[in-house]
Image (cartoon, rainbow, N blue to C red):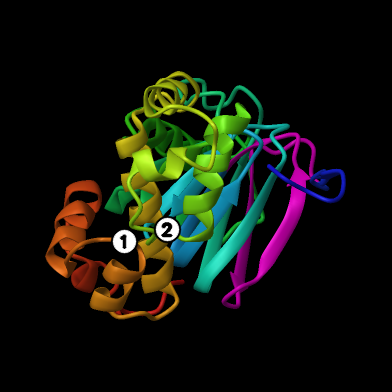
Amino acid sequence: MSQKRQPVFEPLRDRRSHIATLTHDYSAGHFIPAHFHDRDQLVYASRGVMTVRTSAGTWVVPTHRAVWIPAAVPHTITMSGMVAMRTLYLKPKLARTLPRGCCVVNVSPLLRELILYACNFRVLNKSSARQRHLIDLILDQLEAIPMVPLQLPHLSDQRAVRVAEVLLADAGNARTLAQLCKTTGASKRTIERLFQLEAGMTFGKWRQQLRLMHAVRLLADGAKVTHAALEAGYSTPSAFISAFRKTLGTTPTLYFKPTARSK
């Protein structure tokens, strides 16, 4: 994660609660600089799209998804469209089944309501029978939470980085990998090996992820489906719709259809 200043440690005032909450609405384009907490976070977008960046990668968090950010992980957050953020800060080791790295996760209808209800309280403590039941329900939902493939792992080898930077600057760039390799001084085979080694996926998969994540941000900012698809490098709007449906389970139009305002 490139940053011009050291991440800021943001401790919570309450040190004894099992879960603390934060409810905040942000304007489009708002940027939260690099910071970290001493608690695990579940950051939920009940409206809008968030982009979370750490030194390990970039995650796009669409509406009705959440990002899991373990304690002590420095991160930034950028808003696409108006964002209604609802955050749960969990006491360390409270959610033992979730990974110790960031990930985007699906939020079931039940978990959504639990998050929104929990945010009516500033803190939750197991000393209260009512709150203990709510905490247990949240933890039970987190145990079976499915992950969403909306991540771009960061690269370290400069040959792969140079290829990635060209596409990060222009996700719709139509050049083939062979053409991109001419600017790196590395062979196509070498770049393919580096992406598999460092990103854990093929170059083609990495590029697909980039295009989908870019298009999702454009839609959150109000772009039409056709514009988002072509701007992100899809050959046709139908190709984008197919990729979107495969990842998020519905079409872009239905996904971003205006609904009742979030709580």
Q: Where residue 16 sits: x, y (%)?
A: 76, 35
Q: Can residue 35 be seen at all in this image of the molecule? A: yes
Count of labels shown? 2
Q: Can residue 148 be seen at all in this image of the molecule? A: no
At label 2, counting other C-alpha atoms closer than 10 Å, the crowd grade (few under 14, some 14-19, many 20 or more) is many
Foreground of the two, 211 or 109 = 211
Please say if 130 is above or below 199.
below
Report the amino acid beneath label 1.
Gly
Give me the residue at 36% from left, 72% from top.
Answer: 219
Q: Which quadrant: the N terminus?
A: top right
Foreground of the two, 57 or 248 = 57
N-term mark: 1 or 2 = 2
Please say if 32 is above or below 202.
below
Q: Where residue 123 sits: x, y (%)?
A: 66, 49
Give me the residue at 36% from left, 40% from top.
Answer: 177
| In-image side of 90 versus 227 (left or right) | right
Q: Range of the magenta residues?
A: 14-41
Label 2 near label 1: C-beta < 8 Å? Answer: yes
| In-image side of 257 versus 210 (left or right) | left
The residue under label 2 is 171
Is residue 185 inside the magenta stretch? no
Q: In whole angstroms, how far apart are the C-alphas of marks 1 and 2?
A: 6 Å
Q: Determine the secondary structure under disc 2.
A: loop
Please say if 26 is above or below 233.
below
Give me the residue at 52% from left, 27% from top.
Answer: 95
Give me the residue at 73% from left, 32% from top.
Answer: 72
Q: Determine the secondary structure under disc 1.
A: loop
At label 1, counting other C-alpha atoms closer than 10 Å, the crowd grade (few under 14, some 14-19, many 20 or more) is many
Q: Where residue 20 sits: x, y (%)?
A: 66, 47
Report the amino acid beneath label 2.
Ala
The residue under label 1 is 233
